[in-house]
Structures are given as structure tokens and as C-alpha cells.
Image (cartoon, coloured by chain):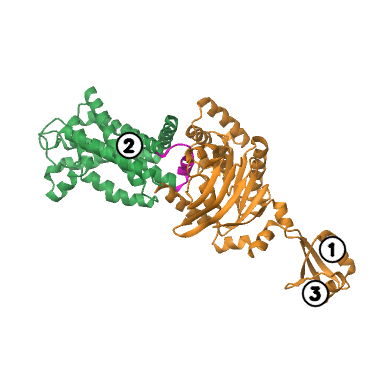
Chain colours: A green, B orange
Amino acid sequence: MSYKAIYVIVSREFKRFFRQRGRLLTTIARPVLWLFIVGAGLMRIIDVRAHGNYMQFMLPGVIGMTVLFSSIFSTISVVWDREFGFLREMLVSPVSRVTIVAGKLLSGTSLALFQGTALLLIAPFIGLGVGIKEIVLMVFLITLVSFSLTAFGLFIAAHLDSLEGFNVIMNFIVLPMFFLSGALYPVENLPSFLRYLTFVNPLSYGIDSFKHVLLKGGGTLTSEFPLSLDIIIVGVFAAVMTYFSSRAFERR
Amino acid sequence: MAAIEVRDLVKNYNGFPAVRGVSFSVEEGEVFGFLGPNGAGKTTTINILCTLLSPTSGHAFVNGYDCTGEPGRVRSSIGLVFQDVTLDGELTAYENLKFHCYLYNMTRRLTEERIEEMLAVVGLWERKDDFVKNFSGGMKRRLEIGRGLLHRPKVLFLDEPTLGLDPQTRFRIWQFIGGLKEKEGSTIFMTTHYMDEAEVCGRIAIIDNGRIIACASPGALKNSLKGDTVYLKTADDGRAQVELEGKFGLASKRLESGLKLIVPNGEKVIPKILSGLAVEVNEVNLKKPSLDDVFLHLTGREIRDEESAAGGERPKAERGRKRVARMIMR
């Protein structure tokens, strides 16, 4: 492992992120659109006044969505680099494959962490109190979830030949993962077939852990699993995906 | 010790032989060229030497290191400039070079020193903070070649270094590479299918269908043809042909219009023919042998025919690259 190489791979991803205006704008606009357009609309028909409001309920889900999209999108850079040849600049250097994977993992995780944490700034505006303790806890949980999803994204990206394939992934993996994660509605109200799908979706546990920290009202619109279970499942998913993604890159 | 040593190298892609038993060696400080049409096995050979592909059988050594057994050592001792651009357009010229230096684990001070020096060499110091996506093809090429040299590799591999560039830019790149050899004393291994480009090399291996069919200096290769070509257009080609045979003992060939004859020394023969022939000569043309002729002589085909038959060079290169990329990553 070369720390210098990891540093330079991560700093490249950050530079690219902040230089691509469209990407930066999407990152800011997407959660705001969901919260204040979808959320505001649904708030009118979902009556949960007793346990806070629907927009508050959506915040942990929207953070989860942002982390999901950001993690998966940052791994598209692997496909991108392969398509445009830059990957070979790395592959013919003395840097090991593991170092390249570590660099991509670290950059994906930190970019998602940065975006997810920034959303906490919205909390006071929708009436959610967030103190130091909550922020520290959220940073820890977002890091864990981002890491697991980036590893998952890298595993997928290692098997993709072209950018077109990425669209398929978006529609058939990323969006269902978001919709079936309890981000928009409580899992327990779902028909049983769909409910089982949410149980195998690691993002459900990630978002559930965010709810533990942010929503304290109790009632139907709060967390549904124990926090320790959330952390264990996301942690195991992260470990398994890290193993498989580094293996996918080792193959020659 | 030879800079590059290759013995009986074979590479099959799914049973299709791309390289069928290639052997050669390159001395330190030499500029060695691989010349051949697209699909001849040039890029495959270079990819094996750069540890991006493993050979089906045979051995390859670079700077004394085994390309299959010690890929890490090979990688730190070589520089590579690919057929197509492998720069990050979203980064500036300076940042692209810095990325490279850090991959090669150079210290910050050394990085700054070398980048400054190299940007001056490739004439891009003024543009160091511009995004690479705004660079012209020639500028990108120069930057890539400079990048390949940042870590002072003992051997620099250039895979079709001027592919797709205009003649003027190609000329500048060649001047630049010529200068590098003088200044840095690097061994250069390049592939090309441009004949004029191959002239720059100290030695050339002509490769066709995965085999080396000739290997010598450009001069020696051309001399091996033993002759210049003279084209004559006369008032009566039939009579001229008979006269050439009778008076000078020269066999000639009838073309659609005119005659073609191969003579050992064109400059000396032409005046004699002109004064000796009774038939009126309208046009004379002398052609010294080119590497094109050498290729034609050795394979019975023109190197350019292959290119147009393959439907242009770009898509093919693209396919090869993707195939290689897949092999590496999957």
C-alpha cells in the first residue's frame, strides 16, 4: 500500500467532484426536491401530527438516498477511467491493485459522508433539533453506510464494461434499493412480499439507524429495528463487499 | 545486459494467435521500432512487455526483470505512452503530472522539480494550469510523453505515438523524441505503421501476422532490395523495351503507360539511357527504395492496403484497447 498513491487518487476524485458543476448542483438539488416538493405534497395527505410531520420523517430517508446515489455514482469513475483509458495509467504504475481499490473506496466514502452530513443543516428548518451528540453519531453512521455502499458500487463497477451498463444498474438496483428501504414509508405497512425485500436490503438498516438518531417521537414513523442490529448488518455488508470488490480487481 | 529480451513469445486470444513466436532483443540506449499493419501483433507485444497481459508461452524480460514473474519491478523501470490519450481532462496539466509522480512514490520536492523541468522540455510550462480537455491533440501527446518520462524510466514504450495527428505535429513530436534520446539516453521501444516514422529508429523489426519477418536498420532493410526503380514514358514503349534489352541488357516491365525497371544505381543509369535510346523519352522518374517497398517485397502487400481494408485505423485500435482493458480487469 502506498499512502501517497491513495492520497493522490482521493484528491483527484474530490477535484473532479467540485469541478463538475452539474454533479455538484444535482447533489444539492436532489434532496431539496424530494424534501420540499415530494415531501410537502405528501405531508398534506399523510396525517401524522401526533408524531411529528412527514417532512421530518423523510429527512433520514433523504440522507440515505443521497449517500446511496453519491456512493454508487462515485464508483462510476472506475468505469469512466476504463472507458477513457486513464485506468491504464494506474495499472502500469508500480501501485498495487489493492491500493487503487483502497483509494476509490476512501474517496467514495468521504464524498458521500460530506454530502450526507451537509443535509443535517436542513434539520433545524423542518423543526428537528440536532445537537453535538446527534451530529457525532450521524457522522459515524453515515461513514459506515457510505463505506458499505461504495464497496458495493465498486464490486458492480468492476464487472461493467461500458457506461451504458450503468443506466441498467441505476434502474434495476439503485432505485429499487431506495424505494424499498423505508425511506419514504414505514416498512411494516408494506405487503408481505415487498416487506421481505426490504429485509434483505442493506440500505433499510442504514436508514433505520439514521431514524434512531434523528426521530425521537415514537409511534409509526420512527425506527423499526434495534440500532445494534442496524450497525451489525451494515458492518457485515461492508466487510463482505470490500472483500468481493478487491477480489474483482485482483483478477487478471 | 539487454534492455529488452524476448524469446519465443506467443499470445493467443481465445485460440486466435495474435503473436506467434516472436524473439528479439533491444540494447540499452537504442531506438527500436516495431513496424507492421494493424492487427500484426504490435500492441499485444507491447502490452506483454508492460505487464498488462500475460503471454500464452515464451519469455519477456525488461531491464533484466521477468515480465510475468516480477511485474512490480518491470513497472517501476518503464515509462509508457499509449496509443490513445490516457490523461484526465478534468485535471490541469500540472495535476496530471503530479498524479503520476505520486503513483511512483516520488517525494514532494522531487515531484516539483521534475514537473517543472519536464513541462519546460515539452513546451507546456505556460499552460501548466490549464485543463487538459482544452488542449490540442499534439499538446496532449507531448504532455503524455513528458509524463511517461517523469520517473526517469530506463525504457520508454511508445505505442503509435503520433496516431491521428496532423503531419506538422507529427514532425514536432519526432524532433522532440529524437532530442530525448540525446538528452536522457533512454532506450525507446516504439510501434508504428507510418513508414516515415520508422526511419527515425536505429533498428526496425517488421512484423506481420504475429511474426517478425525482418529485423535490421532502416538503411540495411532498404539496401536489401538491391535497387532503385526507374519509370520511363516514351513515344513507343514497345520499341523502347526492346532497345533497353538489346543495348543495355536491362529487363523492364510494361505498365499501363510507360515502363518500369529496377536498376542498382538509378542516378548513373538514367543519363546513359537518355543518350542511348533512339525512341523519344517523354518522362523519367527515379524512385529510391522506401520501407514501404521493403514491406511490399517481404509480404507481397502494401502496408496501407491493410489499413483501408480494416476500415480505418481508429475503430480497430478502439476494439483492441477495450479487449485489453477487459482482460486486465476481469
**Chain letter belonging to callout 1:** B
What is the three-letter code of the residue carrying label 2?
Ile
Side of B313 where A211 appears, left or right: left
Q: CA distance from mark 3 to mark 2?
A: 81 Å
SS at badge 3? helix
Please state which of residues A235 and B257 is positioned toward the viewer in this rendering: A235
Please state which of residues B127 and B190 is positioned toward the viewer in this rendering: B190
Residue B1 x/y as whole percent: 61, 40
Side of A40 where B47 appears, left or right: right
What is the three-letter code of the residue carrying label 3?
Asp
Is disc 3 surrounded by few (<14), some (14 to 19) or many (20+) residues within 10 Å? many
Badge number at residue B270: 1
The answer to whether residue B158 is magenta is: no
Residue at label 3?
Answer: B237
**Chain letter belonging to callout 2:** A
Residue A31 visible? The answer is no
**Chain letter belonging to callout 3:** B
The answer to whether residue A88 is magenta is: yes
Residue found at x 24% / y 45%: A177
**Residues flagged by tags 1 and 2 on a common chain:** no
* Foreground label between 3 and 2: 3
Magenta segment = A83-97
